[in-house]
Amino acid sequence: MIKPLNFSFIPKIAVAITVLTVSCAKYKSTTIDPLPNPRVVETSLQKEMPFPMGAAVNVGLLKSNANYRNLVIKEFNSLTAENAMKFASVHPGKDTYNWTDADYLVDFALSNGKRVHGHTLNWYKSLPDWVNNFQGNTADWENLLKTHIQTVVSHFKGKVVSWDVVNEAINEDGTFRNSIWVQKLGVDYIGRAFQYAHEADPSALLFYNDYGHEFGPTKRTAILNLVNDLKNKGIPIHGIGLQMHTRVTQSDSNLAAAITTAAATGLKVHLSEIDIALNPDNIQTLTYTPDLAAQQAAKYKSIVKTYNGIPKTQQFGITQWNVCDADSWILSNYNRPDWPLPFNSQYQRKVAYQGILDGIK
Ligand code: XIL
């Protein structure tokens, strides 16, 4: 008699691999992940989803970590540089540009068939000292703004299809942030930033990017007013980026309002930096539980479902900010354990990954 094959060793091997996998994590996920459903193993976000799926990528990890690199190649078809295209990275001295990391990322993306979204031409953060200390009159500042934008956009022309032109210009109370740019140039610099980018690459899609659309109507309305005002003035703006650094306790109705009101502008909508924090109260002893994992999956599902409901032509895509939980900026920025992404610290799919897939059912 032929003995039936015994596959009982497979779970043991899987456990052994999990244990042996060198963690990139300070805070390891528990055995809740990976997803138990083998059906999804051969698929990927880029294959399953009806719009582009992206990640913000760290060039150091891309170069040094094969798990990271392979996951990026497999799962995503759109990439954003986490930091490599920011002002301080590419323009560290008045007459010095450093393209090394950004070019590496763009070459990696294009040779793997991925779209590149540029982030960001103008922000109040990540400025080099030479800008913060710059002495000059209004015309000198205008020239600095214009030169930076046009040099960066020209460098990547034909490779980077879209840009976050201005990032985070609005405060939570709906007023304009008193950034160095507003101090030196007034709020109308925002429109000119878009015009300068458009002059340098007329084919590039240009976005205004910000966070907190889901906080409530105050900030959201101010952002929408800004964007509509730019549109009405004939400024070349093509999209609105909703960062969506959100939390598991945020209500589905607030999240839906953020997405649908952005879509009502008629512009393309990019969920440009999504992550869903499980530990917004910074509890140092919090652990990742099946309950939290399920809540997070439901939240990803709800967001994706709403996004899938806006007109197809406006779906620029969904980009998660970072790749796996261990490299999420949330952990270092807020100095706490957290598990905000669809991949755990061992680069395995979490329950949240299934939540994303369920969002388009
Ligand atoms: C963050 C990066 O992830 C960090 O590595 C860096 O130290 C600070 O910036 N909103 C944005 C992103 O638009 O550029 C930020 O990225 C996260 C918040």
Image (spheres, rainbow, N blue to C red):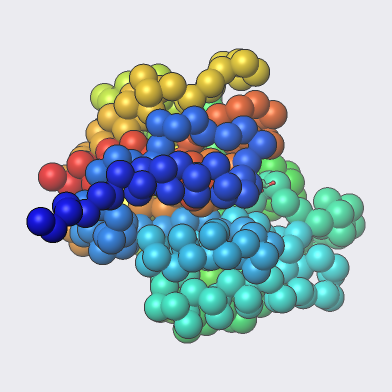
Quadrant of res 355: top left
Viewer-side residue, 13 vs 240: 13
Question: On the picture, is 185 further left or further right than 352?
Answer: right
x and y percent of residue 135 in the render? 89, 57
x and y percent of residue 245 in the render? 48, 36
Question: On the picture, is 40 further left or further right than 323?
Answer: left
Of all residues, the one furthest to the front in this rendering is 1
Compared with 289, 50 (above or below) is below
Question: On the picture, is 33 further left or further right than 61?
Answer: left
Viewer-side residue, 294 vs 86: 294
Compared with 31, 45 (above or below) is below
Which residue sits at x=84%, y=75%? 95
Compared with 204, 183 (above or below) is above
The answer to whether residue 11 of the structure is visible from this angle is yes
Name the quarter where the C terminus is drawn. Answer: top left
Number of numbered discs on residues: 0
Which residue sits at x=76%, y=60%? 88
Compared with 317, 302 (above or below) is above
Name the quarter where the N terminus is drawn. Answer: bottom left
x and y percent of residue 30 in the render? 49, 30
Which residue sits at x=53%, y=65%? 69
The answer to whether residue 174 of the structure is visible from this angle is no
Viewer-side residue, 74 vs 309: 74
Viewer-side residue, 342 vs 267: 342
Which residue sits at x=61%, y=27%? 337
x and y percent of residue 261 in the render? 28, 38
